[in-house]
Amino acid sequence: MRINSNLPDHPTKEIPVHVDMPELDVAAAREIARDAVTETGAEAMLLSWHSKKTGEFYPRAECGGDDRPPWVVFAESRGANLIVDINDGDFRFYFLLL
């Protein structure tokens, strides 16, 4: 299944987080991202994520067809409006604020 997203740019809030954990993995980063969202007082649903450190991403879907990564297309096509960026892009988590 292919999901295409040709949506116009929409406002997206970004929360930068810096942690001093050289061995930070996806599971720990995900918890840090969820905690960062909780600290804002908002409720949010995690839509997708990417690890620059390992190249892993979720969901493993073929989306788009343009030059944007599939995890970005997937999240944007579902209304992602919050990104938690951990350690300058080592991990990026895309959320939909509820």
Image (cartoon, helix red, strand yellow):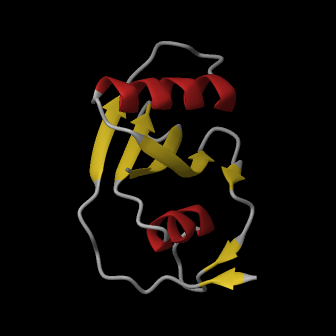
Residue 34 position (above or below residue 24): below
Residue shown at the point (41%, 39%) measured from the top left: 85
Residue shown at the point (43%, 87%) measured from the top left: 6
Residue 84 position (above or below residue 34): below
Q: Is residue 51 left or right of residue 80?
A: right
Residue 10 coordinates in the image, percent (x, y) = 27, 70
Residue 73 coordinates in the image, percent (x, y) = 52, 71
Choose top left, top right, bottom left or bottom right for residue 11. Answer: bottom left
Could you tell me which quadrant the N terminus lies in?
A: bottom right
Residue 91 coordinates in the image, percent (x, y) = 53, 39
Please count the marks in the image.
0
- Residue, far left: 11
Residue shown at the point (39%, 39%) measured from the top left: 43
Residue 25 position (above or below residue 22): below
Residue shown at the point (58%, 82%) measured from the top left: 64
The residue nearer to you, when weighing 60 against 24, is: 60
User: Does residue 29 appear in this view?
Assistant: yes
Q: Is residue 67 left or right of residue 83?
A: right
Choose top left, top right, bottom left or bottom right for residue 84. Answer: top left
User: Does residue 25 appear in this view?
Assistant: no
The residue nearer to you, when weighing 78 against 56, is: 78
Residue 41 position (above or below residue 66): above
Residue 9 coordinates in the image, percent (x, y) = 28, 75
